[in-house]
Amino acid sequence: MNGILTDRVAVVTGASRGIGKGIALELGAAGATVYVTGRTETPGRLPGTVAETATRIGELGGIGIPYVCDHRDDAAVEALFTTIRTDHGRLDVLVNNVYNSPASARWLGRPFWEVPPKAWDESFDIGVRSHYVASHFAAGLLIETGGLIVNISSPGAEHYTHNTVYGVAKSAVDRLTADTAHDLADTAVTVVSLWPGIVNTELLQLVPPDTDGRRLITLPGEGTFDLNAAETPRFPGRAIVALATDPNRRSRTGKPWRVAELADDYGFTDIDGRIPRAEPIRRA
């Protein structure tokens, strides 16, 4: 894979850890210059910083550029893309991934009357509005290159998952994908939503094993899963590399795509050779 994205420039928002980090690493492994955004400069309860991700990108053969940025600050986001134009004169891939997973996890499985309005703001400010703002400021650069926008979404856009706020937010992300693709129809830019399955992020790695060694998590609306069978954060990254290098990707614009579905179409696997399917545990 090394070198297939050499001379390409990418931005991955919220890439200190989790899915964003995995995506940034795969873009770097393909040779891209990757701007890694996030607020984390020093490790906290969860490991990972923008600098650590950028360093790892360099070790994999790409160029990692850490960019500390609060995606609630529109001026800071605008400055990011101004810097990219000044320093590189191009942008090829924007991955809108930033999301406040720890905040969302607090309300897992709660009915809407037990989920306070601030949870709505947390999900929509960082996870919907942030995607719009980054796309807005990146659009000019991406139109010039015929680039790719990937909005990280979820099957929660299609059926009940986690709680009401989560599902409505993910539905909004998929609508953002459809409508921005409509606006970009006369350009060469592709916009897609990406639906990972159950991803074994640093947050979910806190789930301890049971007496049988299984790390079980129950997700309302989906079922119970063994995290030992989950996909790694780099699996969605491989989907994005496949899209970024597909000359026919425009046929996919405006739509959501499951990572496993793209793995079938493009022929990639997770780092252990599997194509994880996020199947719930069948109980007797």
Image (cartoon, grey):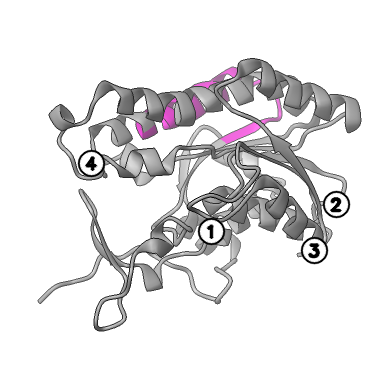
Q: Quadrant of residue 204?
A: bottom left
Q: Are marks 4 and 1 in contact (CB under 8 Å)?
A: no
Q: Amino acid at mark 4?
A: Tyr
Image x and y of residue 164, in percent: 23, 33
Circle 1 residue = 233
Q: Which residues are magenta?
A: 170-191
N-terminal-most mark, 4 or 3: 3
Which residue in the structure is indicated by mark 3? Answer: 59
- Any mark on residue 6, and which? 2
Q: Earlier in the sequence, mark 1 or mark 2?
A: 2
Q: Looking at the image, tell me whether mark 4 or mark 1 is earlier in sequence order.
A: 4
Quarter of the image containing the C terminus?
A: bottom left
Under circle 1, the secondary element is loop
From the image, state whether disc 2 or disc 3 is nearer to you. Answer: 3
Q: Residues within 10 Å of mark 3 (few under 14, many from 20)?
A: some
Q: Position of residue 56 (x, y in %)?
A: 73, 59
